[in-house]
Image (tube, grey):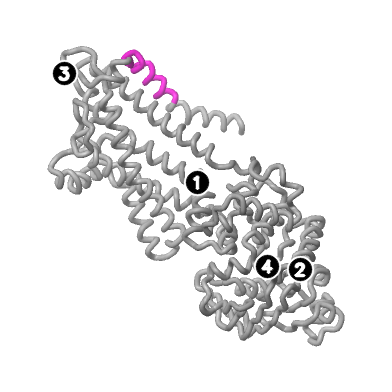
Amino acid sequence: MTGVAVLTVALVLLPLFAIFAYLVYKGIGSINLAFLTQTPKPVGEPGGGMANAIVGSMVILGIASLLGVPLGIGAGIFLSEYGRNRYGDIVRFVSDVLNGVPSIVIGIVAYGLVVMRQKHFSALAGGVALAIMMIPTIARTTEQMLLLVPQAIREAAYGLGVSRWRTTLSITLRTATSGVITGVMLAFARVAGETAPLLFTAFGNQFWNWKMDQPTAALSLQIFTYAISPFDEWHRQAWAGALVLIVLIVGAVAAVRIVVRHGTLAAGA
Amino acid sequence: MGVGITVEHLNAFYGKTQALFDVNITVLANRATALIGPSGCGKSTFIRCLNRMHETIPEARVDGTVHIGDLNVYNGTSATQLRRRVGMVFQKPNPFPTMSIYDNVAAGLKLSGFRNRKKLDEVVHKSLHSSALWDEVKDSLHKKSGASLSGGQQQRLCIARALAVQPEVLLMDEPCSALDPISTGKIEELIFQLKEQYTIVIVTHNMQQAARVAEFTGFFLLGKMIEFDKTEKIFTNPSDKRTEDYVTGRFG
């Protein structure tokens, strides 16, 4: 039995390590200071880097998190604390459907909502597209995590004269923090690598851009463009970009975990 | 100081099911009053009506009048306001698992916006003393989580947490049913001391416990208050046949 368990664990972990090892093998050679600090060079010129795309990805993901996390957690709170009825069922159903909508379709929605109105591609549009993708995942995991908090804990707070909304925020949500964070990180990691919804929202950019309402480079877009190009140099850079992207995601998830662990007292400590 | 409780014509419902039928009772200040009766007789529902916890259950409702001191519980008093004056200890110890011991005790005050650090320290200190837990936890107030204590300690922590908001009445819903005899003994001792400052209403399954801690005892059966009298009288010379049958162990 133990043997089977070990075997399945190995089978599950193998693809992850294989992907990571292959990325390192292919990408590490092209990562240097220039890659991390310079913008792309025109075709034919060697060198250059993806610094603008790295920053652009961070900006877009920042916007997405700023919009998606509060909305997702808010919806999760509604579902668990106030949504044990027909309205809740409607929201649950819609959120599950939204979770299954192809990401490119969400990109089109953001195009219609933001790009058409602004008349040009922008980091904001990309952020909106990714935020829409984050919401259902965060909402449903938040709901599940809050439902795991025993009713007795809420009653303890009510019994002290704490109001309902205060109980929800300071007791229920706080008790479920680590689970809620897991949901947020899951959603974050999922959208961080998304390319399709950015194609006609953030669009990509060969140069630095610091304005949120202008076309913005993103790592996933840059990888896509370089990977389908006919140039060996660009292929190598695409590998390097993929490696940087995965390291950024793992780094962000790990950083949040550490911060959260420091902020809360582990039960049973 | 504790205050008295007057209940008149109290009926409680869960949806269409009526759980309490026309309960009338007067609880004296600074006394312990025990409520006994078989499972499902409505005694827990009854004390949950005293601090309006009953209405937190969907579709539950109440009619009748309850006065706690000068507060008219179901008329012109907000539930949160009321619950600050009527503390509650639950059947299963329920400390906030992610909070330290200190934060558990201070939670009621902190969450109502009270921030004065020095005053909080004082209240936490005093409440843990009153619940006879101070000596066991004084070195780990901030280090340990409330959930890391033993069951009996957790229940005393919950008592301290309830006392910290300085209530006048303390409701206890079978506070010892999840505890071993030694922890039970400690809680009972505590009830004896707490009576000096608070009015205590305790629901219990254990008739010996009622006899040990309470001056007055009420017997519930099928949602009705059958008899309410001095504890001695209930256990030695009850006026109702059903009370006698119950306390002598003929049913329930």
Q: Nearer the viewer, residue A269 or B124?
A: B124
Q: CA distance from mark 4 to mark 3?
A: 77 Å
Q: Position of residue B119 (x, y in %)?
A: 62, 54
Left or right: residue B222 versus residue A133 is right
Q: Amino acid at mark 3?
A: Pro
Q: Nearer the viewer, residue B51 or B194?
A: B194
Left or right: residue A142 versus residue B12 is left
Residue displayed at 51% across by 49% down: A174
Task: Write down the residue under mark 3.
Answer: A42
Compared to residue B145, the image places residue A156 above or below, namely below
Using a 10 Å C-alpha cutoff, classify the residue at mark 4 as few (fewer than 14 neighbours), some (14 to 19) or many (20 or more).
many
Task: Write down the residue under mark 4.
Answer: B170
Q: Nearer the viewer, residue A231 or B189?
A: B189
Q: What residue occupies the far left of the structure in this picture?
A: A119
User: What number is the disc on residue B186?
Assistant: none
Q: Amino acid at mark 2?
A: Glu
Task: Write down the residue under mark 1.
Answer: A177
Element carrying mark 3: loop
Left or right: residue A77 versus residue B73 is left
Compared to residue A131, the image places residue B188 above or below, namely below
Q: Main secondary structure of the magenta part?
A: helix
